[in-house]
Image (tube, coloured by chain):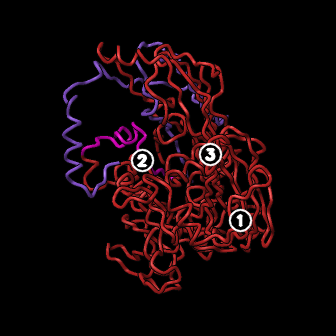
Chain colours: A red, B purple
């Protein structure tokens, strides 16, 4: 999976008592991922990461390849093991993505006996991991199936976070999903990876395919053995010796540890992804490798929510509050697609909005002729990063923040946010990115956010500008918001913009659930 | 905000906040399960809809902020 629980969403909306309070904003996963990346502390990641599948991807372990490579095509941050541990290697100290590796390592293998677990799980097909759909992979002769349950804490999302205890309120929640899709990944005779087609109508492909360029083990023993450069390919933290190839082969191992799959000849890999049930019509069109029609033991999606009965004493206190005004952070989005290399961009993101708080711009390599990798095998144009199985996007951005120059945000058509157009780098990091998360990075020992300047210069290149420095009397004045700048990257970019604003129109009686009309 | 460098102030504030110790505002807590509206297992429309009418009428206070959404998924590689 790409990092975090949010890549399953493209948008969500909330209706309260049949009135829409949160509008659907597409590509909301890019925004929600930004919130996690800038607000979670390392302790949060330790405590919640295993539960909600958040393991911060390394930022400078990325590579870029115009054509097929051992990591894939275009933007790749999918190397999950050591090649040559050398501080002088091309990527300095980060030569693999530990976050992705940790997401892979949580997968339980139910087919191969592992550490005696099979002695407890009497019959593998009824083991608890499969029953509860928990990070479980099952091998058959013709396919592997991963059972995985996405858990999304609602307080990591806007609106829900601010809701108090409410009785009798009617809500309708609608989520648009990035599922029911697939990609075809091809392995060439030289052991290189490429992707050839994408199916499905979703905006993000939520899964990743690991690089093949890391060699840890080359024989049937468990000793670590690094290969010569010419031998690059092969097993990634491989433990199942039966499926290992000899040193120097061009076999490609997809995955890590017990979750790996080994392609032993030039081959095509169909990857299909869906909710609850999955069949062979997904995955780049009709799957010619295998016929399957699978479903989880769980039949529906659900929300688990705590409910409480108050003691009479506290009930009396709480019922004295007959109206709770709930200002919450709402989001409106806009995109600038296909900003060509060395080109300027200039767009009004929103025409009229009040109480704007921040604008966040997330850059990604575009699809299309000047985008993420050259056209592959004449079979079409490259995928955008969102749909690439080799990129972490949109859990990470493209590493292009220093290449965005002359950046300016203009509000109400005439008022620039920055005194001078920004060439984004050190000053921007100090002013706008370092000040995210708990205590805004200003209190030693009690801050969240783990984004360093190195992260921002690489794959966490969020451009963030504060819009709330204004007189209080101007808070409710609707303004337009326009962004201008220049793309100095050699590749075309898609810019996904999100504007946070305080929505103060929501007010309820928490005891009977009635939404109250604002005067 | 308490100055974390001032240990005396921290200790004093802690002492002042003990007045209500031992009181619990709740009689009962339970986790309600809200299933989505799709009972046919068909998510090919890429949409997930929840209507909370079943738990909103329970008479209990609902703590939406600490709910968790659960989406079982499958990935098949062949």
Q: Is residue A138 magenta?
A: yes
Instruction: Please report the residue visible at 45 percent of the width from the left and 78 percent of the height from the top.
Output: A93
Name the mark nearer the viewer: 2 or 3: 3
Upstream in sequence: badge 1 or badge 3: 1
User: In which chain is the residue bearing label 2?
Assistant: A
Instruction: Please report the residue visible at 56 percent of the width from the left and 70 percent of the height from the top.
Output: A458
The numbered dot on residue A124 is none
Upstream in sequence: badge 2 or badge 3: 2
Q: How far apart are the two marked residues, 2 and 3, measured between alpha carbons?
A: 34 Å
Helix, strand or loop at label 2? It is loop
Q: Which residue is mark 1?
A: A407
> Quick one: A25 or A38, which is closer to the camera?
A38
Where are the magenta residues, as a range? Answer: A120-141
Query: Residue B26, can we see it?
Result: yes
Q: Report the side of A355 relative to A95 (left or right).
A: right
Instruction: Please report the residue visible at 63 percent of the width from the left and 22 percent of the height from the top.
Output: A518
Question: Is label 2 on the same chain as label 3?
Answer: yes
- Image coordinates of residue B47 in percent, x first then y, are 63, 33
Q: Which residue is mark 2?
A: A135
Seen in the picture, residue A330 relative to A113 is either above or below; the reply is above
Q: Place residue A113 in its image quadrant.
A: bottom left
Q: Is residue A47 magenta?
A: no
Q: Are marks 1 and 2 in contact (CB under 8 Å)?
A: no
Helix, strand or loop at label 3? It is strand
Helix, strand or loop at label 1? It is strand
Q: Which residue is mark 3?
A: A500
Looking at the figure, which quarter contains the C terminus of chain A?
top right
Q: Place residue A275 in its image quadrant.
A: top right
- Image coordinates of residue B9 in percent, x first then y, are 23, 49
Instruction: Please report the residue visible at 45 percent of the width from the left and 70 percent of the height from the top.
Output: A235
């Amino acid at each position: 999976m790409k990092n975090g629980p949010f890549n399953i969403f493209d948008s969500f909306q909330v209706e309260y008592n049949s009135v829409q309070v949160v509008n659907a904003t597409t590509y909301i996963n890019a925004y929600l991922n930004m919130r996690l990346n800038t607000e979670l502390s390392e302790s949060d990641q330790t405590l919640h990461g295993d539960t909600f599948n958040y393991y911060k991807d390394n930022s400078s372990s990325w590579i870029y390849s115009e054509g097929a490579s051992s990591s894939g095509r275009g933007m790749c941050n999918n190397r999950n093991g050591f090649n040559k541990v050398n501080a002088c290697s091309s990527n300095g100290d980060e030569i693999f993505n530990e976050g992705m590796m940790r997401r892979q390592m949580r997968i339980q293998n139910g087919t191969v006996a592992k550490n005696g677990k099979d002695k407890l799980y009497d019959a593998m097909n009824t083991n608890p991991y499969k029953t509860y759909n928990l990070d479980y992979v099952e091998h058959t002769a013709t396919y592997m199936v991963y059972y995985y349950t996405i858990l999304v804490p609602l307080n990591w999302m806007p609106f829900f976070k601010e809701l108090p205890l409410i009785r009798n309120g009617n809500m309708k929640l609608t989520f648009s999903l990035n599922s029911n899709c697939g990609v075809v990944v091809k392995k060439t005779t030289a052991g290189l990876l490429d992707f050839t087609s994408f199916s499905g109508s979703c905006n993000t492909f939520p899964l990743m395919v690991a690089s093949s360029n890391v060699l840890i083990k080359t024989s049937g023993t468990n000793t670590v053995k690094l290969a010569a450069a010419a031998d690059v390919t092969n097993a990634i933290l491989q433990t199942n010796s039966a499926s290992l190839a000899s040193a120097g082969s061009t076999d490609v191992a997809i995955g890590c540890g017990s979750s790996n799959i080994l392609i032993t000849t030039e081959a095509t890999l169909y990857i299909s992804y869906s909710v609850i049930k999955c069949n062979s019509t997904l995955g780049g069109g009709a799957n010619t490798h295998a016929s399957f029609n699978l479903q989880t033991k769980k039949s529906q999606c659900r929300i688990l929510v705590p409910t409480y009965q108050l003691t009479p004493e506290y009930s009396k206190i709480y019922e004295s509050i007959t109206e709770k005004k709930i200002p919450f952070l709402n989001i409106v989005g806009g995109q600038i697609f296909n900003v060509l290399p060395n080109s300027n961009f200039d767009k009004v993101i929103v025409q009229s909005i009040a109480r704007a708080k921040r604008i966040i711009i997330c850059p990604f390599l575009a699809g299309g002729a000047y985008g993420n990798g050259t056209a592959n095998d004449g079979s079409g144009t490259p995928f955008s990063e969102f749909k690439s199985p080799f990129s972490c996007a949109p859990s990470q951005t493209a590493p292009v923040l220093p290449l965005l120059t002359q950046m300016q945000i203009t509000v109400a058509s005439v008022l620039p946010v920055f005194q001078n157009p920004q060439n984004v780098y050190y000053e921007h990091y100090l002013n706008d990115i370092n000040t995210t998360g708990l205590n805004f990075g200003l209190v030693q020992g009690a801050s969240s956010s783990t984004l360093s300047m190195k992260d921002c210069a690489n794959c966490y290149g969020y451009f963030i500008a504060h819009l709330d420095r204004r007189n209080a009397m101007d808070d409710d004045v609707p303004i337009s918001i326009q962004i201008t700048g220049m793309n100095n990257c050699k590749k075309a970019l898609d810019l996904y913009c999100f504007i946070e604003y305080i929505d103060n129109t929501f007010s309820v009686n928490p005891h009977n659930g009635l939404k109250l009309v604002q005067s | 905000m308490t100055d974390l460098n001032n240990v005396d102030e921290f200790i004093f504030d802690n002492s002042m906040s003990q007045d209500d110790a031992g009181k619990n505002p709740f009689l009962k807590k339970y986790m309600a399960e809200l299933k989505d509206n799709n009972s046919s297992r068909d998510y090919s429309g890429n949409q997930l809809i929840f209507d909370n009418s079943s738990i909103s009428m329970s008479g209990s206070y609902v703590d939406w902020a600490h709910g968790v959404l659960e989406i079982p998924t499958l990935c098949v590689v062949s």
